[in-house]
Image: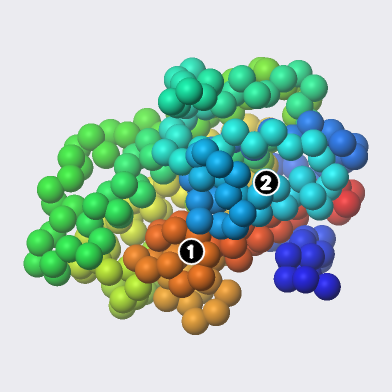
Amino acid sequence: MGKITRSIALCCSLFTATTAFSQAVELAQGAKYVALGSSFAAGPGVAAQLGSCGRSDHNYSHLIAAALDLSLTDVSCNGATTANILNTPQGDASPQIDAVSRDTALVTVTIGGNDIRFTSSTFACAGKAPDEHCTANLDQAAISEAVKQLPAELGTMLDAVKAKAPQAHIVLVTYPRVFPSDAINCRELALSSNDTVYLAALGQKLEEAFVSATSSRQSLIADAYVLAEGHGPCATNERWVNGANVADTGIRFHPTAEGHIEMARLVLAALGNNSQ
């Protein structure tokens, strides 16, 4: 039995995702499944790549679709924001929500990091001199305002998806934790102490926005952030997220192939035993 098969098989023995429902979700074989989101959903650098947008055929949505025998439409894309889901084309691609229809049975989404410039700020500051204080040169006022707006924007997005597919089960999949609790001592991040503190706090605020957006809605949340502690860039094995250097698969500061296996497992756990 391969690594992916073993990990997927664990989905029903460990119910670790936080959910808003107490009953298991039932999905018919061949039901329509739409995957929305940014690069953390798409899987750039994870083999095999499917052309544009950094999508991998082994990102978490493809693993879920294979496990549940669903018909997947994956429109996740590098750089996407909540606006790119709702109403703003991204390059030649239509808004991602256009892929959702009334017969959609399952929607997963990982979005919001680009809205608050989380990943781009991490990219910009990695490898800078320790005394450069890169994050002090960011537009922190604009980032702070974006953070304040994000829970409402995520909520608007979730409501719009539900309006298009009233019977769909929606799972918001959080960003795996890039900055562990001892992030300052993690050399793999290649960030100064000041920059690490700022960006770690930004990652925590992203997580809080996800929890806030789902707390008053009939949605599920697969919380990879909470469970990724100990599996970050400085983990010696079972690394879910890369640091400044790519250890195995994926791209820097993004989920590894192992990370996508675990995100898939958490979604399957959130859906419950009867989904198998």
Location of residue 25 (image quadrant):
top right
For badge 1, the amino acid type reads: Val
Crowding near the residue tagged with mark 2, few <14, some 14–19, many ≥20 C-alpha atoms within 10 Å? many
Q: Is residue 122 visible?
A: yes
Which residue, as the protein is rendered here, is positioned at the far left? 131
- Seen as rendered, the residue at the extreme bottom is 236
Determine whether, in the image, residue 191 is placed left or right of residue 118: left
**Residue at 22% across / 60% down in the picture?**
195
**Quadrant of residue 126 within the rendered picture:** bottom left
**148 or 174, which lies in front?**
174
Colouring rule applied to residues: rainbow
Question: Tag 2 or tag 1, which sits nearer the N-term?
Answer: 2
Q: Quadrant of the N terminus?
A: bottom right
Q: Amino acid at mark 2?
A: Ser
Question: Is residue 78 left or right of 141 when viewed as pictured?
Answer: right
- Which residue corresponds to the image point at 66% horizontal and 54% vertical from the top-left? 58
Q: Would residue 86 be seen by someone viewing this image from the given angle? A: no
Q: Using the numbered discs, state the Cα–Cα distance from disc 1 to disc 2 in whole angstroms.
A: 17 Å
Point out which mark residue 131 bears: none
* Mark 1 burial class by Cα count in 10 Å: few <14, some 14-19, many 20+: many
- Report which residue position mark 2 lands on: 61
Residue 83: x and y in percent read 44, 25
Q: Position of residue 235 (x, y in %)?
A: 48, 77
Q: Say which residue appears at 29% left-offset and 72% top-offset.
A: 184
Left/right of residue 183 with respect to residue 155 in the rendered view? left
Count numbered badges in the picture.
2
| The quadrant where residue 16 appears | bottom right
Which residue is labeled 1 in the image? 241
